[in-house]
């Protein structure tokens, strides 16, 4: 059985040469993407993945539109799965006070203390079949994607935008935050979260990302230590781009170029969007890392009932070699945003 081990050392941002301010990224008017992947051990002795994501406003869509979406997967019994994706005509993710406060009729994603932008975060859903209520802390040393918290994801020109420099992607990740409290509802029954055996990956992103991509959040285990990493792979006008930002012991940040990401022939075709998603990948990095990644369930697409704004957000299992010599196993999430989503 996979063990989810939360970390409690804090973000570790005091001396990092970050180009992003963690606290200010949780204050208006910095909009963008707010993502939580909660790996949970329940009172029924099952493991679960809850994805919760709000993007406000949607880039290059009508400015008065926001997307919020979530899913619950029973990792122990992957046949049990539920997702939703809805749009709201409220582009704001912040309260009038400036604090993170994205609330809709049946969903929310907000800071628990309006006066502290880095306070615990609560996210919840009352959507039938995908009900949850989770509160987690930003208690894990951060990953600064690209090494400093930003990278150039798109070179332009941007659609419906005057010519000029294209903003970078700003992204920081908190890979193993402690779940303070929470529950999910499975088949009508309330399942309480075991906080000591659960964790949340929180991802904060804004700026201009690539228009389509494959992204992995990975939790590797060498037998003695946990190694979280954020992996980007996308096609640019001047060729394929890819790198992994890895956080090792002591908060050490490493940025490692990707040699290749090869999908398998095992695929899933969505009935709602028509997209075809790979379900297995072989990831090779320049440092000798080679990982086999595999989705545990075919249908893990997040998509609206009309087939709009699709993305595959799936739980994956991992095995391979880290750094050319260390056998590892692990787990994580893959996000595949196909061409034409934006």
Image (cartoon, rainbow, N blue to C red):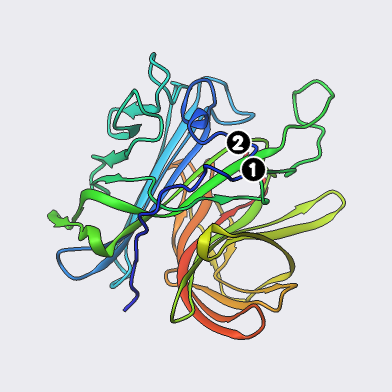
Q: Is residue 299 above or below residue 303?
A: below
- Name the outermost residue toward the front: 15
> Picture coordinates of residue 170 (x, y %)?
63, 39
Q: Residue at x 48, y 29 (%)?
A: 66
Q: Report the residue at 60% width, 28% height from top.
A: 61
Relative to 202, residue 78 above or below: below
> Of tags 2 and 1, which is closer to the observer?
1
Q: Which residue is more in the foreground, 147 or 236?
A: 147
> Looking at the image, which is closer to me, 81 or 241?
241
Q: Position of residue 99 (x, y in %)?
A: 40, 23
Residue extending farthest to the right is 238
Residue under label 2: 20
Q: Secondary structure at mark 1?
A: loop
- Counting other residues with Cα less than 10 Å from the Cα at mark 2, is it few (<14), some (14-19), or many (20 or more)? some
Question: In the rendered image, is residue 316 in sight?
Answer: no
Q: Is residue 24 shown left or right of residue 166?
A: left
Quadrant in the picture for residue 252: bottom right
Percent x, y of residue 1:
31, 79
Residue at 28%, 72% in the rendered image: 77
Q: Is residue 154 above or below residue 191?
A: above
In the rendered image, residue 109, in percent from the top left (x then y), is placed at 35, 35
């Amino acid at each position: 059985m996979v063990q989810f081990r939360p970390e409690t050392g804090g973000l570790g941002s005091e001396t990092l040469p970050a180009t992003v301010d963690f606290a200010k990224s949780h204050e208006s008017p910095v909009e963008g993407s707010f993502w939580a992947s909660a790996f949970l051990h329940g009172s029924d002795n099952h493991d679960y993945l809850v994805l919760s994501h709000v993007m406000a406003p949607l880039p290059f869509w009508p400015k008065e539109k926001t997307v919020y979406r979530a899913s619950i997967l029973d990792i122990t019994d992957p046949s049990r799965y539920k997702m939703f994706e809805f749009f709201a005509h409220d582009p704001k993710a912040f309260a009038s006070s400036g604090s993170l406060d994205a609330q809709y009729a049946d969903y929310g994603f907000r800071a628990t203390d309006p006066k502290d932008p880095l306070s615990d975060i609560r996210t919840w859903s009352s959507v039938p079949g995908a009900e949850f209520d989770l509160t987690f802390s930003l208690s894990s040393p951060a990953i600064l994607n690209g090494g400093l918290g930003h990278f150039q994801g798109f070179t332009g020109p941007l659609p419906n935008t005057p010519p000029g420099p294209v903003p970078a992607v700003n992204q920081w990740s908190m890979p193993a935050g402690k779940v303070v409290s929470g529950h999910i509802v499975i088949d009508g029954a309330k399942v309480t979260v075991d906080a000591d055996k659960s964790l949340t990956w929180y991802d904060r992103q804004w700026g201009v990302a690539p228009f389509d991509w494959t992204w992995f959040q990975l939790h590797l285990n060498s037998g003695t230590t946990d190694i979280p990493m954020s992996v980007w792979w996308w096609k640019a006008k001047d060729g394929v781009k890819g790198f992994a930002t890895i956080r090792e012991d002591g908060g050490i940040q490493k940025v490692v170029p990707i040699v290749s990401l090869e999908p398998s022939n095992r695929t899933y075709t969505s009935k709602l969007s028509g997209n075809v998603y790979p379900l297995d990948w072989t990831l090779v990095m320049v440092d000798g890392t080679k990982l086999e990644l595999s989705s545990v369930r075919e249908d893990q697409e997040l998509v609206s009932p009309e087939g709009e704004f699709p993305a595959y957000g799936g739980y994956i299992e991992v095995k391979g070699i880290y750094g050319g010599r260390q056998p590892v196993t692990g787990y994580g999430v893959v996000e595949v945003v196909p061409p034409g989503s934006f």
